[in-house]
Amino acid sequence: MQIVSYLIYLIASVLFIFGIKKLGSPKTARQGNTLSSLGMFLAVVITLFDQRVLTFEYIIIGIIVGAAIGSVMALKVQMTGMPQMVGILNGFGGGASALVAFAEYFYLIDHAPNLEVSTSITIVLSVIIGAVTFTGSFIAFGKLQGFVTGKVVKYPLQNLINVILLLAVLGAGVIVVLEPLNTINLYGIVAVSLILGVLLVLPIGGADMPVAVSLLNSYSGIAASMTGFVLQNNMLIIAGALVGASGIILTIIMCKGMNRSLMNVVLGGWEDAGSGEGAGGDGPKGDAKSVDAEELAMILDSAQSVVIVPGYGMAVAQAQHAVRDLTNILEKKKIDVRFAIHPVAGRMPGHMNVLLAEAQVSYDKLFALEDINDDFNNVDVAIIVGANDVVNPAARHDQSSPIYGMPILNVDYAKTVVVNKRSLNVGYAGIQNELFFYPNTLMYFGSAKEAMNKLVNELKEL
Amino acid sequence: MEILDLLMLIYVFVLAIFVGFELITKVPPTLHTPLMSGSNAISGITIVGALLSAGAEEFAISTILGMVALIFATINVVGGYLVTDRMLKMFKKK
């Protein structure tokens, strides 16, 4: 029987790998996800035949409750709420890993009082990483949902406190390894790890959440791998390592997208970030030219090539459908429309792409920064919908700017730049955007959804 | 677990990380959100450990921990795969 289950676990591991491989193209991605879920199903079924599984009451309860909650969440969540959804799922994954390691610890000390060193090390690591992921993810969820402040939180001795807590956890871990039967230490590790998860995510600002969510994604994978070490199960190790790698790669991409080090993001980053005021006072000033819907419709009508740059503002205003309507009417007028998507636009990697997919914008119209940036010279109108720092030209030339060096979309090279925004307020980085005062920039004030709808109506009348 | 057993597990871990890096660098940015939620569902693989703990014969603290772990892991697995499918369904080329 064990041979059969090992073979099935191998098949499941291969299915996970194929599943991720098929995510390499939007055409095969859905099939990949199905393969991956088939792997998970096989793994669960064969585990039910394991010699350790003798009673089924708790299993049935657990699966029914979990499946009910999971499916309601998955079917109800709005596409704009996807960062929160992924955040909270990370938390459950991490929490499950920590609990499994904890349960395994009690099982082992009941059945084999002499815990081996390598087993207790992996139990401790699994509990720490899982517990940090658990509370960290819930704080990230709270920040994205608005329950917890999206601002950068700083308090005295912040880093010192974190270092002390981390050392305390590791110290207690060593004691558990040396005296495995002393359960109180493991409780201590759980408690401190839970606090550590809160403290590590709390300082991270709202717009840095793409990094935080990616990093927590990676943690949840590593936690699963550690549980694999505890159970000596290769499938868990492989699956967890795949997720761990995925999270790390996305974290690196997000950090590069902001030209910041991981440390800088994790420790709270920019001084004025998210404060909404900051250096706005001594930033570039001048007269921003504003434009109304009617005038803008005429400008667009005579354009041949239009690029739309969506940002978090589009998600907040739920304006993706209005933006789609704009795309459709422009295309009807034989105007070429493309989308330029900055890697850190929105609150998680790929956030904008999902919203536009929901609005039925064809995915071959969505371009990544490096694929479209050299082409802005040939663009007649660039329309920025709810984005700010990612199009601030100061990142290219102003060495004193906090965002200096960050890769930006070169929208200012387009013949006309239209910025749709509610006001001239500063963006997340707390700095004024000089783009607003450029001679080729027109400000189109208003909330994204209404503004786009108005524009579509004007275009219809032309 | 002998130290040699641990080493064999570390072999698998390290090699799987390399496989993961190779696969994931090929995922286009447009699919990064489904990648996150889909890989997240995979990390719910701890469900296997939760089943072992929750299905133990005698009732003990590990059984309760196992059941809670099972609820969490099932939310992670079911929610993750469903929401990923919902998203991927929407990615269309006209």
Image (tube, coloured by chain):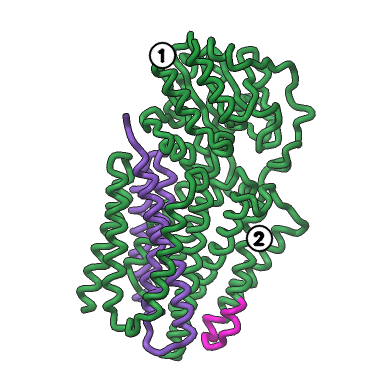
Q: Is residue A107 above or below residue A460?
A: below
Q: Do dots 2 and 1 share one subunit?
A: yes
Residue A338 in sight in this render: yes
For image coordinates 52% across by 47% down, the residue present is A81
Chain where mark 1 sits: A
Q: Give the percent coordinates (x, y) of residue A275.
A: 73, 41
Q: Is residue A179 within the magenta segment?
A: yes
Q: Main secondary structure of the magenta part?
A: helix
Q: Is residue A281 left or right of residue A59?
A: right
Q: Position of residue A396 (x, y in %)?
A: 60, 26
Subunit of label 2:
A
* Quadrant for the N terminus of chain B in the image: bottom left
Q: Residue A271 versus residue A334: which sits nearer the camera?
A: A334
In front: A409, or A306? A306
Residue A199: numbered disc? 2
Instruction: Depth check: give the residue in front, A295 or A213.
Output: A295
Give residue A333's mark.
1
Q: Amino acid at mark 2?
A: Leu
Q: Position of residue A2 (x, y in %)?
A: 23, 78
Q: Amino acid at mark 1?
A: Lys
Assess whether residue B80 is covered by the magenta stretch: no
Quadrant (top left, top right, bottom left, bottom right) of the C terminus of chain B: top left
Tell me if A79 is positioned left or right of A168 in this view: left
Residue stretch in magenta: A176-188
Quarter location, residue A272 = top right
Colour assignment, chain A: green
Q: Residues within 10 Å of mark 2 (few under 14, many from 20)?
A: many
Question: Is there any visible trace of residue A241 in the rendered image?
Answer: no
- Residue at x 27% of width, y 57% of height: A15
